[in-house]
Amino acid sequence: MSTSSRIAAFLSYLLLIIGWLYVFLFRRHDSFAKFHAWQSILIVGAAILCPIIWAAVGWLLFHIPIAGPIVAIALFSFVIVVIIGLLAGWIVGMISAFQGKVRKIPVLGDWAERLTIGWR
């Protein structure tokens, strides 16, 4: 694994949008960097979508008398667990990119691999 490929993959985690643009514009033939860029995109996307989905479900649950609001508030613990897991995956992805390893995080890593192969 070349040093420039490892740096590009690492930057896709560290600089987010700027790192993704760098990989997809200047390193588009580097499958290692693209894999880590896709994995980083999916982590950030999941971190954004999780609270939005919770808010929508919570809004619907608040219309159910008595138990609805309690369940909606309790579901926020799921959001916290997901965000902590995504943060751990982000750190593991950053470390593995720096080390030159392809280490897939659970669920999102498989999607990143499919996107890397399918998006040329």
Image (cartoon, rainbow, N blue to C red):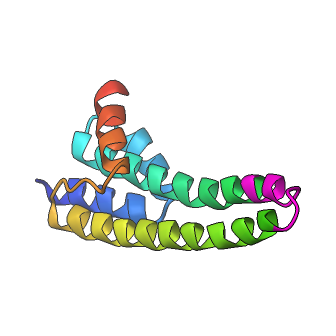
Coordinates of residue 59 in the picture (x, y in percent): 83, 57
| Residue at image point 55% right, 73% down | 80
| Residue at image point 81% right, 52% down | 60
Coordinates of residue 103 in the picture (x, y in percent): 20, 56
On the rendered structure, is 66 left or right of 30? Answer: right
Query: Is residue 62 covered in magenta?
Result: yes
93 to 120, vertically: above or below: below
Coordinates of residue 120 in the picture (x, y in percent): 34, 26
On the rendered structure, is 15 left or right of 77? Answer: left
The residue nearer to you, when weighing 115 against 5, is 115
Most distant residue in the left direction: 1
User: Which quarter of the picture shows residue 118?
Assistant: top left
Whether residue 120 can be seen here:
no
Whether residue 72 can be seen here:
yes
| Residue at image point 30% right, 42% down | 110
Q: How many marks?
A: 0
Query: Is residue 9 covered in magenta?
Result: no
On the rendered structure, is 62 left or right of 34? Answer: right
| Residue at image point 47% right, 51% down | 41
Query: In the image, which residues are magenta?
Result: 57-66
Coordinates of residue 114 in the picture (x, y in percent): 32, 33
On the rendered structure, is 18 left or right of 65? Answer: left
